[in-house]
Image (cartoon, rainbow, N blue to C red):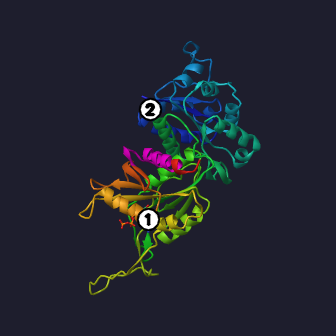
Amino acid sequence: MTRVVLGVSGGIAAYKACELLRRLTESGHDVTVVPTRAALEFVGAATWSALSGKPVTTDVWDDVHEVPHVRIGQAADLVVVAPATADLLARAAHGLADDLLTNTLLTARCPVVFAPAMHTEMWEHPATRANVATLRERGAVVLEPAEGRLTGADTGKGRLPEPAEIFEVCTDLLARGTATADLAGRHVVVSAGGTREPLDPVRFLGNRSSGLQGYALARTAAARGAQVTLVAANVALADPAGVKVVRVETTAELRDQVLGAAVDADAVVMAAAPADFRPTGRSDTKIKKAADGSAPAIELAQNPDILAELSHDRPHAGQVVVGFAAETGDDTGSVLDLARAKLARKGCDLLVVNDVSGGAVFGSPDNQAMILSADADAVDVPFGSKAALAHAIWDQVAARWPG
Ligand code: CTP
């Protein structure tokens, strides 16, 4: 069983850490909650103790015979601090050890995640900027806060990232065992979801793409230090922390946003499922049933192939373009034959191939794939999480960037 320390510092978002705690315990982790004294002003020790099934203390002077100020950090596989206030980030950056949480941070040798939450002014203050930079330099993952409603009437950057997102980052770090910022300084563009082509104000042609693989790509790239633009078509998932999310509906909108963002990108990964066809006309009013029982004919036009366009008109040499293909073998060839032909036809550098003959992967948290390229052997990625496949794809992308 993996040991997770959930540090909670004193901000109003402390109540959201209860959901993170639930997710961590329900997925089988042994969680020790270490709140600061200020955190207990927001959510009491009884809540943390009941949800974690363990005693909870803020103090280094409780249970001294068990040496908790050293033992908890040493034994941890992951420490996540949510919310991390400006004060907590400052104390962590300066190595202070004035309570149990900061002692734990000094003794932990495992990956550490900070999920900040504070007012925009505090986040943007040069002191906080410097503390965040110091913590990142030392290898900690400091998530970018989300934008939106803050305590009181104001809005801006500073909200705690969604607990579901913090949980995904933790799960990913526990699976990898280490935090690396090997994509720092790179801009990557990822498309996700399925486009919808409207027929009338209420109907559309669409597909079942959930966006999970594209979101895993965006989240993992951000966790590895990249600047990420995620172009999302009709996806019902929380924004990954620190990722610029652009929402689109149709293939034409997806094309505009992806091509626009790709201009200065080091890599573009087309994980979206764009509709290949669109109705030639969109009715401004709802299409009614005909009295004679006849069905309307829908004329379709072909949409542009964004991946082929990206591959052929690259804004700069060195940009890596990645496509996806869900294939089933047929009498014209095996999955591998068809995928190799698609790689050549599209002109991309890498093609991630899912063999969907045995059942679909849509909406599933897991995936299995092969990563093809024209100039190297295929890389087999065994059945595993979409995050694991995302990491394998970024490894292949990074290997193609010139030194
Ligand atoms: N793609 C795209 N633009 C489209 C359709 C697809 O950029 N209009 C991208 C997808 O994002 C994916 C890749 O192309 O990365 C493969 O999509 P697929 O539907 O398998 O390709 P098609 O060209 O439609 O091939 P097929 O003839 O097998 O349908």
Please give the name of the residue rendered at 45% of the width and 61% of the height, measured from the top-left corner: 272
First in sequence, mark 2 or 1: give its number.
Answer: 2
| Number of residue marks | 2
Please give the name of the residue rendered at 60% of the width and 63% of the height, measured from the top-left corner: 263
Mark 1 residue type: Lys
Mark 2 residue type: His
The residue stretch that appears in magenta: 378-398
Dot 2, how many residues are within 10 Å of its Cα: few (below 14), some (14-19), or many (20+)?
Answer: some
Against 346, residue 352 (above or below) is above
Q: Front-most of 386 and 171?
A: 386
- Farthest residue toward the left? 331
Residue 41 x, y percent position in the rendering? 63, 34
Residue 374 x, y percent position in the rendering? 43, 56
Q: Which mark is residue 29?
A: 2
Label 1 CB less than 8 angstroms from ligand 1? yes
Residue 126 visible at all = yes
78 sits left or right of 277 in the view: right
Name the residue tied to disc 1.
Answer: 346
The verdict on residue 389 being magenta is yes
The verdict on residue 310 being magenta is no
- Farthest residue toward the right? 126
Q: Front-most of 160 and 214?
A: 214
Which of the 4 image quadrants contains residue 388?
top left
Q: Main secondary structure of the magenta part?
A: helix
Q: Front-most of 95 and 375?
A: 375
Against 192, residue 27 (above or below) is above
